[in-house]
Amino acid sequence: MGRLAGWAGKNLIRAAVLLALVSAASFFLLSLSPIDPLQSNVGQAALGSMSPEQVEELREYWGVGVPMTKRFASWFSGLLKGDMGISLLYRRPVIEIVGERFLSSLWLMASAWVFAGVLGLLLGILAGTFRGRWPDRLITGYCMLTASTPAFWIGLLLLLVFAVQLRIFPIGLGVPIGMESAQVTFADRLSHAFLPALTLGLTGISSIALHTKAKMEEVMDSPYVLYAKARGESLFHIVRCHGLRNILLPAVTLQFASISEIFGGSVLVEQVFSYPGLGQAAIAAGLGSDVPLLLGITLISSLLVFGGNLAADLLYHVVDPRMRGEARQRKRERRRAKKKAEEGMAKAALSVGSEEAGTPGRGDGGREISSGQETRALQMRHNHRQDESMFCRAEAGSAEGRPSGAQTAVEGGKDSQGQTFLPSQKNTHGQALPWPERKKCRFLADRRALTIALLICSAVLLAGIAAAGLLCSEGASVSDFSRKNLAPNAEYLFGTDWLGRDMFLRTLAGLSMSIRLGLLTATVSAGIALALGLLAAMGRTADLVVSGLIDLVMGIPHMLLLILISCACQKGFAGVAVGISLTHWPSLARLIRGEVLQLKESQYVKISSKLGMSRFKIACTHMLPHLLPQFLTGLILMFPHAILHEASITFLGFGLPPEEPAVGIILSESMKYLITGKWWLAVFPGLLLTATVLLFEALGHSVSRLLSPGGAHE
């Protein structure tokens, strides 16, 4: 009971600190906004017709000219009393608006959360059980496709098919138009929420399914499952008795931790279906500079994310008996391991100290030698023994008729069956590997070469699309009303829009913009992650700062953080680049930080520290080379996600200005014309965007396998 109370108190303090930091960071970002709330909400014409007293009253109402610290102190003091302020757009208390919208969003997110969790778990079990067969390939392909597709584009397709074409479901909104709330039935609410919940669920399946698949593959390769197969147990019995017990808890934990992604997706989905939830209110507050409402939504969403992570931790500690008391056991084990490592390093540290102080040691002949000379002598003896053992193996191989190691390094040959083999297909004794192993070596070499070739071709394709989009940017903005609303044909492959603009040229120009933004922001984000990961090696204080910064950024849903930064920056290329660059680094930084903490415990890093090498030099000399493969993989995987988020934020109206031919703007404008049957305005731009993201998503996973320790070993 005491442990549980201590754990609860610790997490309550952590939640309070996190919410305070989120409040301060959000308020600071919104205070940087260059938007004049009077002009954006009242209008310049209306302001010109008002008296100075009325304008001054409006300025006081919107908080124009009040210092940021004074406004934050006033707002935060009210927050401690349970008052989030008055919404500037709706002229109602923020807590009332958030309460109403939260119930609608909760119904939507809970339905999608359960649907994605159950279906993702089943698909992951199926794919992991039949690894390498057609169910695995089909499910993995589906997960890769949905992970590379914007959630709002899936919503547009479902809206086009089931609402516009088939007329099975309503087009949008949360309730029927013109009906009082007392007359709305449960069936009405269900029919209006079905398509938004289905969109959220379809996009949330991939992460839980891929994670469950990986865990299921580990279970199927375990010794106890192999023993169960040898006993003749059925596959269903193995999955039910051995698989579910090992994968259910990690899957449920991951599902609780995915609340942030579900909330970010709901912001986009609610905008597509005009669903009255927190996401749509956040968009309206961001576009209208309604600071109290946007801050209230940010706090509620951060509290929801923290609650999901807390539930995941609690589930592990309560349900899994192995986690009870494991923290203390790990601490004792680390203490014992550290003591053994210090004892093992005592001789090396003593030698270093003797060499620096000039303290003599004893040689074999009784004469005094320095510790440095003793270390060099031991190294020479070790090298001499290695040379002797290599020479003996070479002589033994020659005596048996086998070629020596030097010969096998450059020569191939044929085995006893006449099969040709490469030098890399021999073992350490120069003998040819068996045919199945040689076939695997050839397959791995071909896969490595195919990955490199795919990387080169993708880079060429990337440069080609970016260059073509720049060249046709002027033609993409040319209007011709004589050719407006033309369906796709031989002359206009993607058709034309309501202004007679060529949709193929507009899509190509928008994709070029997305690629340039994605490359820039992915590079900057990966650089930030690498720098923060190396900063964690500078000491315990620096590591606490880095981990706290990661928790702060990940405590706010990604899409809400993008909205906050977009409000702080003006519309345009620079504003979008800053927003995406500052929000994509936490996941990679957390991985690099974990790798750095492991490297700090390695022997050569500890010895370098004993030798007097500075932490900065250790990080740059010993740690950075080990982090480069992970950095490169993270950079490639970050690029498609940057493209998706650029399209998402511009779709919501926060990114590039409307005159820019961005894919998100094109898809946002197409929503107005879907009901009239102009399907090509939404289908082809989203299809091309998804294909580009899918290509680089697959490329990133291939490079990850190539640069992973297992791939390097192979």
Image (cartoon, rainbow, N blue to C red):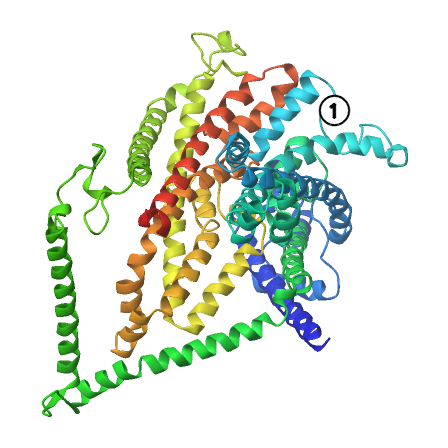
Q: In front here: 449 or 164? A: 449
User: Residue 248, how many percent across, how many down?
Assistant: 64, 50
Q: Residue at x 62, y 44 (%)?
A: 233
Q: Characterize the local packing of mark 1: few (<14), some (14-19) or many (20 or more) Cα atoms within 10 angstroms.
A: some
Q: Position of residue 128 (x, y in %)?
A: 55, 41
| Residue 64 shows up from this direction | yes
Q: Secondary structure at mark 1?
A: loop
Query: Residue 621: x and y, percent?
Result: 26, 64
Identify the residue under disc 1: 169
Q: Amino acid at mark 1?
A: Phe
Q: Quadrant of residue 253?
A: bottom right
The residue drawn where x is 69% and y is 44% is: 278
Quarter of the view holding residue 279: top right
Report whether 578 appears left or right of 235.
Answer: left
Q: Is residue 422 above or below residue 457?
A: below
**Residue 43 in view, yes or no:** no
Dividing the picture into quadrants, the one containing residue 82 is bottom right
Residue 544 in the image: state x and y as whole percent: 48, 69
Q: Is residue 460 above or below residue 411?
A: above
413 or 172, which is in the foreground?
413
